[in-house]
Image (cartoon, helix red, strand yellow):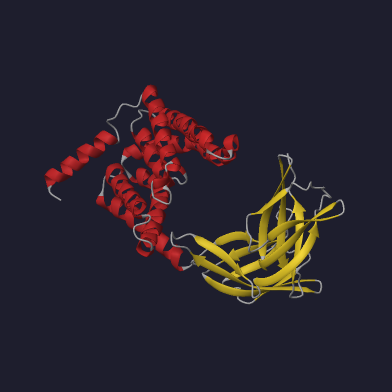
Amino acid sequence: MTSENKNIFRRVTDKVYGGLPMGWPVVILYAVGTALLTTAFLLIPIFENTSFYRVGVTFEAWVFFAVIIMANCKKPLESALKTFVFFLISQPLIYLLQVPFSQMGWGLFMYYRYWFMWTLLTFPMAFVGWYIKKRNWLSLLILLPVVGFLTFTYADAFLFAAKHFPYMLITALFCLLQVVVYLYTFTGKWLQRALGFFVPLAAVLAFALFTPQLELYTNVLLPGSPPISSAATVVNGNEDVALVTVGDNGTGFTMLNVEAHQYGSTDVQVTDGDKHYNFTLEIYEDDTGHSQTRVIVPNENISLETVLPLPDNRKLSDKATLVSDNEKVGKATISKTGDKSSVRIQSSKLGDALLTFTDGGKDYYYTLYVCDDGYGKPTARLEAIPMN
């Protein structure tokens, strides 16, 4: 890079990180503008599973926005106040703008608690962060956690892009550019810049070498959700792939807790009294690079025909109709014996299905579960879905 180019680059960084007006009207407009942009990235389908969608989920873009504010303030207290207000406006506004388009409605704000905690932390962080403007060893010390986070993100994103090109490529380049620009702008010596670049990178590489390739915590249900008690025990064939335990997790169903450490499969047997449930648990990466689990049972394809009474003893008229959303699990028809209503089930696969009864202009919903009975045979049960 020639001396002239260096001067041009320095003039640009001096303007962006110290030469922009940052009065209160600018901060407020800045907050509203970033909120509108982020909401667009979250709502417009074309941005789903892209680096742009991450603006509304992860921190790297918000580090970029915050550093611009801090660098253009005159005093550390001003930096703290304006950064805090920026986040106090932008984050809830992102959720508010999504409410009309979300099935959760106002319930979407349950996720704001996480961002609100970080909003509170922006005040002390921006107060200390203002001192990066000193361009000395203190600046480097303050920058290191930020540079470390960005280094971890760009390294992980580059690896992801190598396997799933071009996913995450923009995130990788964006974070790498931030690291380079911050070290160039806020440090005064090449030794500081070299240490700031290579020390976090070495730490990230060391971390990658000595940690598992995967850390996935999730819950799974066996097909058809067999009624397993919390006293059930688990025998896991390959604990290097995943640890599997039993727990209800407050869902009303006994679920299998999965702690996966690498991709692969493991044979699992759940024993509940004299009942045994055998299956294979697969941990895999889908086409977009997300870790997924899949339960495979040896006798998933079955042949079952049975008649089940409605669990709430509901009496249906002769004009009632029934629709199943999964006819492989439950091809269902209404059966009546005297004044009692029941359902005739024909099933060719373990799993669950939603049954919708319509009678007299009203809809009634039931879940059909077709599962292994623990003795190697299929069984079925109906559960009514409470109506509000």
Which residue appears at 38% of the width and 58% of the height? 155
The number of numbered discs placed on residues in the rendered structure image is: 0
Where is residue 244 shown, x and y percent of the image?
Answer: 65, 67
Q: Looking at this rendering, what residue extends furthest in the front direction? A: 318
Q: Quadrant of residue 63?
A: top left
| Residue 219 occupies quadrant | bottom right
Residue depicted at x 39% and y 23%: 24
- Depth check: 382 or 331 in front? 331
Q: In the depicted view, which residue is nearer to us: 175 or 82?
A: 175
Q: Position of residue 303 (x, y in %)?
A: 69, 71
Vertical comparison of 361 with 353: above or below? above
Q: Residue furthest bottom?
A: 237
Q: Position of residue 290 (x, y in %)?
A: 48, 59
Residue 127 appears anywhere in the view: yes
Name the side, left or right, on which 207 lies relative to 169: right
Image position of 335 (left or right of 203)? right
> Of residues 362 and 121, which is closer to you in this image?
362
> The C terminus is located in which quarter?
top right
The answer to whether one can see residue 76 in this image is no
The quadrant where residue 258 appears: bottom right
Viewer-closest of 204 and 113: 113
Q: Is residue 276 shown above or below 87? A: below
Q: Hey, which residue is sitting farthest right in the picture?
A: 338
| Spot occupied by residue 120 in the image (x, y as percentages of width and height) | 53, 35
